Each structure stands twice: as structure tokens, then as C-alpha cells.
Amino acid sequence: MLELDRGTRPLRSWYRKAQAYDAYQGHPLLQQRYGTAHFRVLVVAPSMTRLQRIAEEVVKVNRQAAANYLFLPETHVHPTTIRRGWFGIGTVVWTTNQVVDRLVEQPQVTLAPSHLWEPTPS
């Protein structure tokens, strides 16, 4: 799946998208339609800051790093940089913050370089 984020939608919408993608993983309808039980979600966004915020919303769904997501800054959408420009979710640290009158847990995500694919030996 490919998601092109232009930074125009609220970040909270990514939480709902991640829930939907999570529900679709391993679903019989996915197998029936595409002949596979699993897929990757490739997210392209205008900046690393936006990618990190999207990754934080994704992590909130299962409270852990999601290996099936890869993130790419739009500046790397080019034939010479697209394979090596991707990032996966490296680490997740949860912190508790007080927001008005309640405590809210928030993830801090570190993105780590991850190749979209490995080159085949010649």
C-alpha cells in the first residue's frame, strides 16, 4: 500500500488509517483479492518531522514498532535515492504527560534507515 501524505490532514487521521491497515493484515479478503496475507505500507511525506509524527500515530495502534511500515521523505522520490532513502521504526519510548486534568501516554519514535529492497547479487 502506498500513502502520499501532503501534510494537509490532521495527524490523528493516521491513527485511524493504521487501525484499518492493521485489521486488513492477514484478513481473508486481502488473500482473496491480492493473493497474499501480509503487505507493507509505504508512507511518503514532505519532511522527516512529519514522517516521525505519522510513525508515532502508527505506534499508538499496537503500542510497539510496526515492521510493516516504511517511511520516505519526498525529497528521496528519485530513481537514484528511492531504494536507500527509507526509514523504519527503530525505537519507541513511551512517556506520560499531564494534559489538563489527565495523564496521557505518548510515544517518542526514532526512525532508523531501512532499504526498501536489497540489491540482488550479479
Image (cartoon, rainbow, N blue to C red):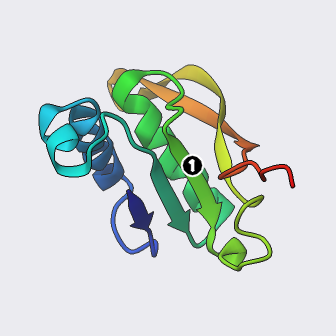
How far from the left and from the top, in percent, is residue 48?
Answer: 67, 60
Q: Which residue is mark 1?
A: 70
Residue at position x 56%, y 21% in the image: 95
Q: Inspect this view and state whether residue 99 appears.
A: no
Residue 23: quadrant of the picture: top left
Quarter that holds the C terminus: bottom right
Quarter that holds the N terminus: bottom left
Horizontally, residue 14 falls left or right of residue 69, namely: left
Q: Inspect this view and state whether residue 33 appears.
A: yes
Determine crowd level at label 1: few under 14, some 14-19, many 20+ residues with C-alpha closer than 10 A: many
Q: Nearer the viewer, residue 44 or 40?
A: 40
- Up the image or down, 86 lies above or below 68; here it is below
Horizontally, residue 48 falls left or right of residue 5, namely: right
How far from the left and from the top, in percent, is residue 47?
Answer: 64, 67
Count of numbered labels shown in the rendering: 1
Residue at position x 80%, y 76% in the image: 80
Q: Nearer the viewer, residue 27 or 76?
A: 27
Residue at position x 25%, y 45% in the image: 16
Q: Nearer the viewer, residue 30 or 121?
A: 121
Please identify the residue farthest to the front as the structure is shown.
122
How far from the left and from the top, in percent, is residue 114?
Answer: 72, 45
- Numbered disc 1: secondary structure: strand
Residue 86: quadrant of the picture: bottom right
Q: Which amino acid type is shown beneath numbered disc 1?
A: Leu
Residue at position x 32%, y 25% in the image: 101
How far from the left and from the top, in percent, is residue 54?
Answer: 48, 51
